[in-house]
Amino acid sequence: MKEASTNKEKIITLLKILFPVLITQLGLYSMNFFDTTMSGKVHPNDLAGVAIGSSLWVPVYTGLSGILLAITPIVAQLMGANKKNDVPNVVIQGLYLSICISVVVIIIGLFTVDPILHMMNLEAEVYSIAKGYLIALSFGIFPLFLYAVIRCFIDALGFTRVTMFITLASLPINFILNSLFIFGKLGFPKLGGIGAGVASAITYWCIAFIAIIIVVKKHPFKKFNIFNTFYRASIKAWKEILIIGIPVGLAIFFETSIFAAVTLFMSQFNTITIASHQAAMNFASFLYMLPLSISTALTIVIGHEVGAKRFQHAKQYSYIGIGMALSLSLISAAFIYFFRSQVASIYTSDIHVLKLTQEFLIYAIFFQLSDAIAAPIQGALRGYKDVNMTFMMALISYWIIGLPFGIFLAKFSSLDAFGYWIGLITGLAAGAICLSIRLRIIQKRYSLSIT
């Protein structure tokens, strides 16, 4: 990645990396979006079942794949320090680690899915769909985590457009497979919400296969000869990845699992409320791809700048990224407010779900500003390899402040289900404030190191 000396050049550089990352994130999330919206067209029970299933799967996947995100700053700093020969071993060790993670997830899932779903006291049909969806999805765990590592390698080099094209290629595959397995098109079995899990699993295999071919065959990735040399599993290399990756994964897990926890608490309400909550949350999460993409782009550019010891440039990139996220958050908040009825109609035609979803979307507006600050700062801190305080802040903000406050409002006020959303908003705001303070501390520390 070339050095950018002026703010204008930095904005252009960041945008070149950001835009493909955004398309990639939106594409990956579109699979969950397609699963939810297309299942909702079958029956509210299918929407609720997929909602419950994905609410359990998403925090597990994002948290564990967050461990593998350590590959991005490690490779970015190696490239910034001109240590290219060390990159292949890092990638291979990441792939080994991804296989181990996949095995652990499958084993734990075998023993925990049933007890968790039973604990939620779901309607029989919703329970069956949620369990079937998770079982089907589990067949795509191996390729999904493998792809996470390859994607981090490609992105760390600054070639984010490549992962964008991989994701775009997978979208029509996922959409067609959803049509076949959810609705039973062309003679395929009509599986409803469970079919969404089947379609996603097959799509994950396609993504991994395409990514491997590109890394092996296409310039500039093939010059790294990632698969040409056999590297033994290295505890030392795993330790480096895990020291950075575990705090990153925990921070992401604490953030995403808080939303899953709220969905679990929502199970005390009827299917209409669960479906409406999940529809609104699904769209809010879709918009979260904007600040999340900026976060990923900042990790890449700041990692390169820190590796090259250009700490003032890293600081400038941080503020540019946060400014972009705040601007986009205002636009997305306005979009939700003025088009909430149209958004709700994407998910369902049921009049009761439609009405309640619009009410939940009003609360989703307030997620935007907090996310616009917190997500880019998390990405910037990962670029500095500063990750331990981030996960502690996430734990305190979401689980000690946000969730208890939400439970209190839901149980002891007239807000009912909306109380949980206010708790989430409070937790996100607390996290944004804490992360802002931490970024200032780190930037000051690096500034002092060059004076």
Image: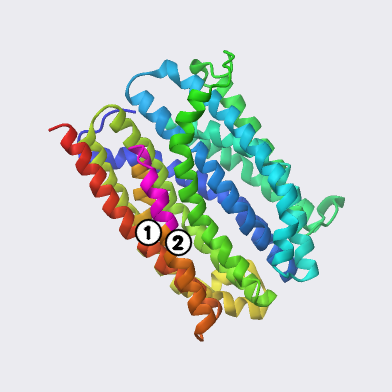
Q: Is 231 part of what is drawn in magenta?
A: no
Q: Name the quadrant containing residue 35.
A: bottom right
Q: Quadrant of the image for the C terminus?
A: top left
User: Is residue 251 left or right of 451 when viewed as pictured?
Assistant: right
Is residue 154 visible in this depiction of the protein? no
Return the mark for residue 398.
2
The boundaries of the magenta stretch are 382-395
Q: Residue at x 51, y 28 (%)?
A: 238
Name the one closer to the observer, 434 or 229: 434
Upstream in the sequence, badge 1 or badge 2? 2
Looking at the picture, how far across and down is residue 76, in whole percent?
39, 30
Mark 1: which amino acid?
Gly
Classed neighbour count for the residue bearing mark 1: other residues with Cα under 10 Å, few (<14), some (14–19), many (≥20): many
Q: Name the quadrant containing residue 132.
A: bottom right
> Measured along the vertical axis of the image, is residue 202 above or below residue 365?
above
Considering the numbered disc 2 on the image, is that residue within a helix, a strand or a loop?
helix
